[in-house]
Image (cartoon, rainbow, N blue to C red):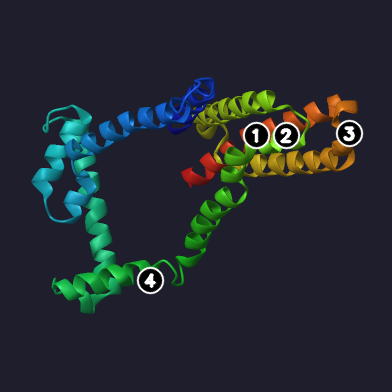
């Protein structure tokens, strides 16, 4: 949905550029307010997480909200099973916390704050720090590979590949659609191939795309009009890179 929204937003902005007034840029801003208001108002009616409620000892509210979220009665067997799974997980976490930090279990406000800080500190202790570093590393590199720069500066990038102004904007829109395709395909490829192979495969394809683009731009950017096939090959590699990039980021987020 995030990528679909970006695609719609881009093409609306592409169309409004032809309005011969300030509405060329005011209208896209105005349209963005509408879903923002819907989201802001809608969040007021969003129920608390059953898992969070259970962690605070509000078990009845947890069961009630879980039934609402599943659109099933509280007595339904599936709701009951999920509810007891949540209670069991919360109890396990509380037991582990009590075992690791027995001196912070008196329930006072100061102890709760210290317990929260200590729980975050546990992420970097023996037995947990490797998984913590994997999570942090994947989330860091999925941004560091250049996603924001590619989206924001894509017209400029296409300009370095010899495209004129209008084609730069069109291909930027195509790039957004490529993102959407890359994300949508993850719905079934994650379960079919697994996260790790897709993460590794996506990384390799991104690397190869980068290398090919660097070589083509380095060799032919001095005379793109005389090397149109090479220019479009660079464009194609950028689309491949973007498709694999979003496969990579979705796999990273899944971890």
Looking at the picture, tell me which residue is in the foreground, 74 or 247. 247
Looking at the picture, tell me which residue is in the foreground, 177 or 220. 220
Q: Is residue 245 above or below residue 94?
A: above
C-alpha distance separating marks 3 and 2: 13 Å
Q: Which residue is labeled 3 in the image?
A: 223
Q: Which residue is labeled 2 in the image?
A: 159
SS for dot 4: helix
Residue 105 in view: no
C-alpha distance separating marks 4 and 3: 56 Å
Within-10-Å neighbours for mark 4: few <14, some 14–19, many 20+: few
Q: Earlier in the sequence, mark 4 or mark 1?
A: 4
Q: Earlier in the sequence, mark 4 or mark 3?
A: 4
SS for dot 3: helix
Q: Which residue is situated farthest in the bottom direction here?
A: 103
Tell me which residue sits at (68%, 24%) in the image. Answer: 167
Q: Is residue 27 above or below residue 99?
A: above
Residue 96 in view: yes
SS for dot 2: helix
C-alpha distance separating marks 2 and 1: 6 Å
The mark found on residue 121 in the picture is 4
What x and y, as percent, mark residue 41?
Answer: 21, 35
Give the quarter of the image for residue 106.
bottom left
Q: Is residue 189 left or right of residue 84?
A: right
Q: Which residue is labeled 1 in the image?
A: 155
């Amino acid at each position: 949905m995030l990528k679909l929204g970006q695609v719609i937003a881009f093409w609306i902005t592409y169309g409004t550029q032809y309005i011969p007034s300030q509405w060329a840029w005011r209208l896209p801003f105005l349209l963005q307010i509408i879903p923002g208001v819907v989201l802001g108002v809608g969040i007021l009616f969003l129920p608390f997480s059953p898992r969070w409620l259970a962690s605070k000892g509000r078990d009845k509210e947890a069961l009630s909200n879980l039934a609402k979220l599943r659109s099933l009665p509280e007595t339904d067997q599936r709701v009951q099973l999920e509810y007891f799974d949540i209670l069991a997980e919360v109890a396990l976490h509380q037991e582990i916390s009590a075992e690791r930090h027995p001196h912070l279990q008196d329930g006072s406000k100061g102890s709760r704050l210290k317990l929260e800080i200590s729980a975050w500190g546990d992420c970097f202790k023996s037995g947990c720090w490797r998984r913590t570093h994997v999570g942090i590393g994947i989330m860091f590199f999925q941004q560091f590979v250049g996603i924001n720069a590619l989206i924001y500066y894509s017209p400029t990038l296409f300009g370095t590949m010899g495209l004129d102004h209008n084609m730069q904007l069109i291909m930027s829109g195509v790039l957004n659609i490529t993102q959407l395709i890359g994300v949508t395909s993850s719905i079934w490829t994650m379960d079919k191939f697994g996260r790790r192979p897709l993460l590794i495969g996506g990384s390799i394809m991104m690397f190869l795309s980068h290398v090919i683009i660097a070589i083509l731009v380095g060799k032919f950017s001095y005379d793109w009009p005389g090397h149109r096939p090479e220019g479009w090959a660079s464009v194609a590699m950028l689309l491949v890179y973007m498709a694999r990039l979003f496969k990579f980021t979705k796999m990273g987020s899944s971890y």
